[in-house]
Amino acid sequence: MLQDYFEDFILLVRNQAADDMGGTDESWQEGVTFRGGVTQVVGKEADISGLMALKTVPMLLHEWDVTLVQGDRIRRVRDGAEFRITGNSSDMRTPPVASTTYCQVPVERLVTAP
């Protein structure tokens, strides 16, 4: 079953506060926990520097009752990897009467230097 491959993720909530220099400080706090899995979807062939290559897009499959929107951030519990949501999960949601219900949304992995 698809849910057998799901693992725990945490939705991160963005907080902004004024700093001493007239700008804002941004921080992220942990929100709700949900289950999902990141996979690669093969897109199309792309011309990269004169050579043809397959372009893949990382996708998050997640529980049907969770709604993620573009700009949200999530953290995978297993390894702390953070991802930014680059679409809306409501655009790729199975019908409620489907035998297996889930949502799919494109993501990009965020890289943070130590």
Image: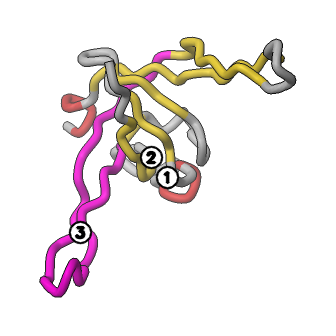
Cα distance between the residues tagged 3 and 2: 22 Å
Q: At 34% across and 45% down in the image, what residue appears?
A: 100
Q: Position of residue 20 (x, y in %)?
A: 82, 13
Residue type, label 1: Arg
The magenta span reads 33-60
The mark found on residue 103 in the picture is 2
Seen in the picture, residue 101 relative to 14 is either above or below; the reply is below
Instruction: Determine contact: label 2, label 1, CB under 8 Å.
Output: yes
Give the mark, 2 or 1, whose residue is nearer the N terminus.
1
Magenta stretch: includes residue 22? no
Residue 45 at x, y = what percent?
21, 80
Tag 3 secondary structure: strand
> Residue 53 is drawn in which quadrant?
bottom left
Which residue matches tag 1? 93
At 55% from the left edge and 58% from the top edge, which residue is drawn?
A: 91
Most distant residue in the bottom direction: 50
Q: In 3D space, how far apart are the residues under numbered discs 2 and 1 (Cα atoms)? A: 4 Å
Q: Earlier in the sequence, mark 3 or mark 2?
A: 3
Which residue corresponds to mark 3?
55
**Sequence order check, earlier mark of 3 and 1:** 3
Numbered label tally: 3
